Image: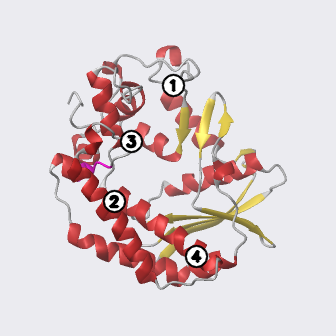
Amino acid sequence: MPTLTLTPSLSHSTIAKLAECPTRYRLRTFTAWEGWRKSAPPEARQAYRLKQMKSLPALIGLAVEDACRWLVGEAKGGALHPPSLAVERALAALRRQWKEHESEGWRDDPKSCTAVMERYYGDACKVTEVRAKVERCIGDFHQRLLARLVDAPLLDIEPFGGFAWQGLRIFAAPDFAWRDDEGFHILDLKTGRPRPEHSAQLDLYSRQAFEADATLEAVRCELAYLDAGESSHELVLRRDRCGEPVAEGFLRRGRETLARYLVDGDVERFEPLPAAEWPMAPVSACRWCAFREVCDR
């Protein structure tokens, strides 16, 4: 088996999490490294298990997005299903994951078996609201976006696997992308609330498209907030902004933040400073963190 090497990478979510709580980034990235190995130290095994844990909102988002892609694929093949079938598909996936948590298979195989963060920590779960949220999100997608995507010549998202930038691997993959007579389009689905920082995510998606296709000059981007029934972010991004490539400033700030917690600020060497040098988020943010169990707070 080839030797795996921990290499530095960034994404929109990674940069946001690093800025919010550097300690969480350290636990996810460095402490959990090689925690999948049976021979790993107990603290690495534990951190890796917690890293693989999913929150209920995250699981809902993944189930809804999978159901929406299924609707598009079925419709392109000539089978136009009512939203209720996609809702049941998403709920079935969530029920499987709920049962996986109850089986506790994640204790030995956290990568393959789902652990639900709220259940693990005994947090309140508004399970009765899950169906309503799934129905709202899939209903909005079916009514507002499905027909447009069925007609669109969708592209394989696999080429959006990332690009190299200043010693880092940058990951940015939207839910849907296509090119037509009006240009290059990117559509990303959201099941949570609109957030101002999501505009930076569109920048990264566009930068990925520009890196993959040197002929592109502009990308039409859209964030569809399914639970709100609106597309709050729609814009056209050019290859250059204010004299530098799109998302350059966002990536530079993320790299500078990361370097602050590495030995000699060397991102390519990627060696962490001692744990005491990594700040923690305010206590109010801890309830959303899977690493409460191992945090020194």
Q: Residues within 10 Å of mark 1 (few under 14, many from 20)?
A: few
| Residue at the spot 36% in from the left edge and 73% down from the top edge | 134
Counting from the top left corner in percent of width and height, residue 262 is at 47, 20
Counting from the top left corner in percent of width and height, residue 288 is at 28, 48
Q: Describe the element under mark 2 as helix, strand or loop.
A: helix
Labelled pair 1, 3 in contact (Cβ < 8 Å): no
Counting from the top left corner in percent of width and height, residue 75 is at 60, 79
Seen in the image, is 23 located left or right of residue 85? left
Dot in front, 1 or 3: 3
The image's colour scheme reads: secondary structure
| Residue at the spot 54% in from the left edge and 43% down from the top edge | 11
Within the magenta stretch, is there residue 170? no
Residue, disc 1: 6
Residue, disc 2: 57
* Range shown magenta: 114-118
Residue 185 seen: no
| Residue at the spot 22% in from the left edge and 50% down from the top edge | 103
